Image (tube, rainbow, N blue to C red):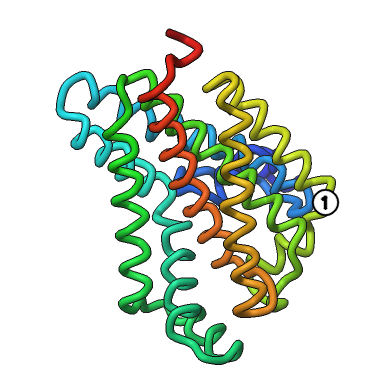
Amino acid sequence: MTEPAARGLPPWGPFAALQFLTRIPIRLRRAPDMAGLVVWFPLAGAVIGALAGAVGALAFEWTSPLVAGALAVVAGLLVTGAFHEDGLGDVADGFGGGWTVERRLEIMKDSRHGTYGVAAMCSSIVIRVAAVASMPSAATVFVGVVTAHVVARGAAVALMASVPLARHGGLGADYGQATTRSRGAIALAMAAAIAFVAVGPWALAAVLTAVVAAALVGALARRKIGGISGDVLGAAEQVAECAVLVLVASLALRHDPWWA
């Protein structure tokens, strides 16, 4: 007798990236190839951003901008399971509360969040809600949220490919070891292409902003723990996402968007 075919989707990169980065119930027939998975993170970010942006854009037409901003951010939290927010909280606790490398890494492993972590996560949420709420139209909300999710993940992959690992254990180490500079460049190029479709010429500023934000987190991580980890990548994504949302909101308030 032949064994029945395994149920589920083929382990194609975009499906695997969505399975890893979201709570969307995706079943794969076999474990994905880590080496080829990370380049699809920006595309997964586009799906996440489209879902969150659609919620925010629809709410923008029916309720106040502040409520629309809150709903867009909450939708992103639900889709991702607060995946990156958890990393930001761990990094804030470790970097803020540890006096040695060993102690910082120990704190970051703790699933509980302290004052620094809670403050960092709340700050991220407040900045994102305020940025989305200040956007002038539903269309800007949609493309702005999509762009932020896309380029923030592209910048995180680029950081993964360019900064050494702080420790060799966990998902961050597995993906970091599988990420080459060429894969980081491909992910960043994919993020730039998607962002250009969304916000046109503003895409260059968005990508540069995300890369600088992620690089600053990476530089801090090198000084605090000697390199990056999965938590650091989550923190980099969060900082980059906040920075890009603020950028898009600022540009939209002062300049006519390309679609106007």
Residue with the mark numbered 1: 181
Relative to 120, say whether 238 is above or below.
above
x, y percent for residue 23: 44, 48
* Residue farthest to the front, as pictured: 254
Q: How many marks?
A: 1
Q: Secondary structure at mark 1?
A: helix
Which residue is depicted at the point 33% across and 48% down?
127
* Residue farthest to the top, as pictured: 260
Question: Viewer-proximal residue, 3 or 227?
Answer: 227
Quarter of the image with the C terminus in it: top left
Q: Amino acid at mark 1?
A: Arg
Relative to 168, say whether 196 is above or below.
above
Relative to 225, say whether 216 is above or below.
above
- Please say whether residue 116 is visible from this viewpoint: yes
x, y percent for residue 22: 48, 47
Badge 1: few (under 14), some or many (20 or more) residues near its Cα, within 10 Å? some
Q: Quadrant of residue 250?
A: top left
Which residue is depicted at the point 59% across and 66% down?
230
Which residue is depicted at the point 72% across and 43% down?
39
Which residue is depicted at the point 60% across and 21% down?
201
x, y percent for residue 129: 29, 43
